[in-house]
Amino acid sequence: MDKVFIEGLEVDTLIGAYDWERGIRQCLRLDLTLGWDIRPAAQNDQLDKALDYAEVGKVIEQFAQTARFELVETFAERLAACLMERFGIPWLRLRVTKPGVNARASALGVEIERGCR
């Protein structure tokens, strides 16, 4: 399976389990690898058969704007399901990093894989 990737996409969202976090928007950094057969698009150089990076980015931004989760794990699960359903993506890997959470670590987060390769 071919892979399309988006690395270092930053979105602001309401996320956190602590009271002080619930009133501020925080940055999450997303790295995505999306399973996608690029051959139909590449065969005749057809954009309409490619996975539209711009549209994927818009959907992620809209998701982040309306999300209200305590856990990064929940954000990751729900975003993965949203993207797979919306674009028909058969497999994805999503890494969600929450920078600046711990003074001793540059970032914390989760990485998930969903679907079949």
Image (tube, rainbow, N blue to C red):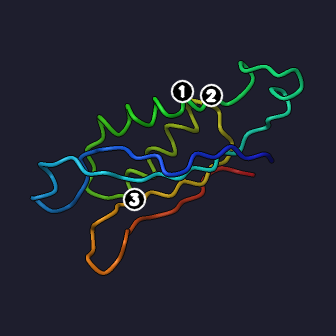
In the depicted view, which residue is nearer to us: 116 or 55?
A: 55
Q: Is residue 2 left or right of residue 102?
A: right
Q: Position of residue 24 (x, y in %)?
A: 15, 49
Q: Position of residue 89 (x, y in %)?
A: 65, 38
Q: Position of residue 58 (x, y in %)?
A: 46, 29
Pointers 3 and 1 in contact (CB under 8 A)? Answer: no
Instruction: Say which element carries label 3.
Output: helix
Which amino acid type is shown beneath numbered disc 3? Glu
Residue identified by numbered label 2: 52
Mark drawn on residue 55? 1
Q: Residues within 10 Å of mark 2 (few under 14, many from 20)?
A: few
Q: Give the residue displayed 46% in from the left and 31% down from the top.
A: 59
Which amino acid type is shown beneath numbered disc 1? Glu
Residue identified by numbered label 3: 73
Where is residue 79, by image quadrant? top left
Q: Give the residue displayed 10% in from the left and 59% down from the top.
A: 19
Pointers 1 and 2 in contact (CB under 8 A)? Answer: yes
Label 3 and label 1: CA atoms lie apart by: 23 Å
Q: Is residue 76 left or right of residue 99?
A: right
The answer to whether 61 is drawn above or below residue 26 in the figure is above
